[in-house]
Image: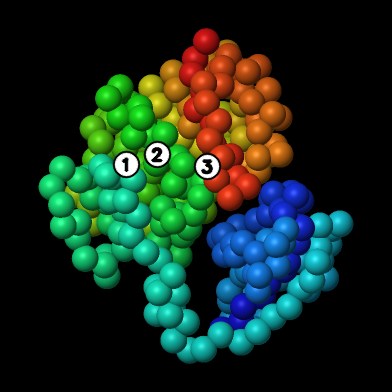
Amino acid sequence: MIRLAIRCRREQAETALAELLELAPGGVEEVSAPDGLEGVVEYAIYGAPGELPELGALQAAAGGALVEVHSERVPDDWSERWKRFYHPVLLDGRLYVRPPWERPAERGGVTEVVIDPGRAFGTGTHATTGMCLALLLELSDRGGSFCDLGCGSGVLAIAAAKLGFEPVFALDYEQAAIAETDRNARMNGVQLRVERADLRERRAPTADVVTANLTAPLLARVAEHWADAGERPRALIASGFLESEARAVRAAFERAGLREERLARTAGWGAALLLER
């Protein structure tokens, strides 16, 4: 197994990531400040020799944000070793997200979500996912329908179902994400409607509450489709963008009839709670 990684400047990381996802739609691993390098983000792709994008294609995708590209062989037990970095997350003392190999919550009154990411991304440990979960908790008393755009491993949709939202929809472009979301939903004993969708081409569905942990360009595309159709959710939690992109994301959704209620920030990333005007 080969680990192919690029390092790029943080202020241009989101643009580089969007381009990289075109080459590796299955997702990439993110490492903030690799080797202590402040202001640098590392994105890595794993695969067998011959299955990975060419170095030249990666360099072109990263463009002016590129710092360096390198590859290394990964030990045969890499699929087990990565689990050391996936830890349980407790949010607001109410929502506990853990992998299946960690112990259950040991306190009462906690909603537990068990997530095995498998081949998909979204464990609850990334800053953007954590902010989405925290904002979702703030809306949990609303109930109603829920839709997650770009569901990854299904963590947000499963959390919503366990918090009482119904019906719950989950969409993703990647078939691996669809499969993992469905598997994790069964593990958690919740019912979801999971569908494959290309949000670049298809108008995203609306619901009482929608989460969209996507890249800034894709968020803009979602907003554009809603604006054209005159549709919008009652509440939207949008993340996956850098703090520097927050103003552009807010403007895009304002044109779709949503107003920003609050902007959360963690580790250079942003998450916005937007409500129907």
Q: Residue at image x 44%, y 47%?
A: 130
Given residues 15 and 32, the one toward you in this image is 32
Q: Is mark 2 on a helix, strand or loop?
A: helix
**CB atoms of marks 3 and 1 within 8 Å:** no
Compared to 106, does 47 lie above or below?
Answer: below
Label 3 belongs to which residue? 213
Q: What element carries label 1?
A: loop
- N-terminal of the pair, mark 3 or mark 1, is 1
Q: Relative to residue 41, is residue 47 drawn left or right?
A: left
Q: Label 3, label 1: how many angstroms apart (C-alpha)?
A: 20 Å
Q: Residue at image x 40%, y 26%?
A: 209
Residue 158 percent location from the top left of the image: 31, 45
Label 2 belongs to which residue? 134
**CB atoms of marks 2 and 3 within 8 Å:** no
Mark 3 crowd level (few <14, some 14–19, many ≥20, 10 Å Cα): many
The quarter of the picture where the N terminus appears is bottom right
Residue 219 percent location from the top left of the image: 62, 35
Q: Residue at image x 56%, y 40%?
A: 265
Label 1 belongs to which residue? 92
Residue 25 percent location from the top left of the image: 60, 57
Q: In front of the other: label 1 or label 2?
A: 1
Q: In front of the other: label 2 or label 3?
A: 2
- N-terminal of the pair, mark 1 or mark 2, is 1
Compared to 120, does 70 lie above or below?
Answer: below
**CB atoms of marks 1 and 2 within 8 Å:** yes
Q: Which amino acid does label 2 sit on?
A: Ala
Q: Relative to residue 197, is residue 138 drawn left or right?
A: left
